[in-house]
Image (cartoon, rainbow, N blue to C red):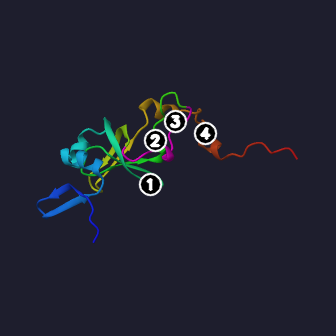
């Protein structure tokens, strides 16, 4: 057998189980204190510090100090100050810290959704034109192209 160096990341006394990790930077944040998910339901909408723990094809999981990692969808990535574009998944690095805002806490499915976007940034994207007076105008065809 090969010897590996691991750290205890979580102790479940009721089930008498240990959760081990081979990633040293996860130990500090997980052993300090992990709050239950219901505590985060009380602060929904608040801005918190987070650390990126895992990157997927559609977003990233971030550690916000909860027993459950929060989900940051790719469309919710922030736009850095002075940057012409929003961040993309390729810009993310595991272990990097960033500010996020808690969008929703689902206690039934045990999930937390967060966003890196500013409140005014979201409102700017929503207002892009005046809505039509009659909803049927949305489905009308435009002018015919020249032949």
Of circles 2 and 3, the one toward us is 2
Mark 3 or 4: the one toward you:
3
Element class at badge 1? loop
Sequence-wise, the earlier of marks 1 and 3 is 1
Q: Is residue 70 left or right of residue 83?
A: left
Q: Is residue 94 magenta?
A: yes
Proximity of marks 1 and 3: CB atoms separated by less than 8 Å: no
Q: Residues within 10 Å of mark 1 (few under 14, many from 20)?
A: few
Task: Identify the disc placed on residue 77.
Answer: 2
Seen from the viewer's position, the closer of residues 74 and 135 is 74
Q: Which residue is mark 1?
A: 56
Q: Residues within 10 Å of mark 4 (few under 14, many from 20)?
A: few
Q: Quadrant of the rendered structure where residue 116 is?
A: top left
Q: Which residue is mark 4?
A: 134
- Residue 126's label in the rendered image is 3
How many residues crowd mark 2 within 10 Å: few (<14), some (14–19), many (20+)? Answer: many
């Amino acid at each position: 057998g090969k010897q590996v160096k691991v750290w205890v990341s979580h102790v479940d006394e009721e089930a008498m189980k240990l959760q081990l990790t081979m990633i040293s930077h996860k130990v500090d944040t997980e052993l300090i204190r992990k709050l239950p998910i219901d505590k985060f339901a009380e602060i929904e909408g608040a801005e918190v510090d987070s650390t990126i723990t895992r990157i997927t094809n559609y977003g990233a999981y971030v550690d916000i100090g909860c027993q459950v990692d929060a989900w940051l969808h790719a469309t919710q990535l922030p736009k850095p100050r002075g940057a012409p574009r929003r961040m993309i998944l390729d810009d993310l690095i595991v272990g990097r810290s960033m500010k996020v805002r808690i969008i929703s806490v689902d206690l039934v499915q045990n999930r937390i959704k967060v966003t890196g976007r500013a409140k005014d940034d979201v409102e700017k994207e929503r207002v892009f034109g005046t809505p039509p007076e009659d909803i049927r105008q949305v489905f009308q065809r435009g002018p015919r192209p020249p032949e």
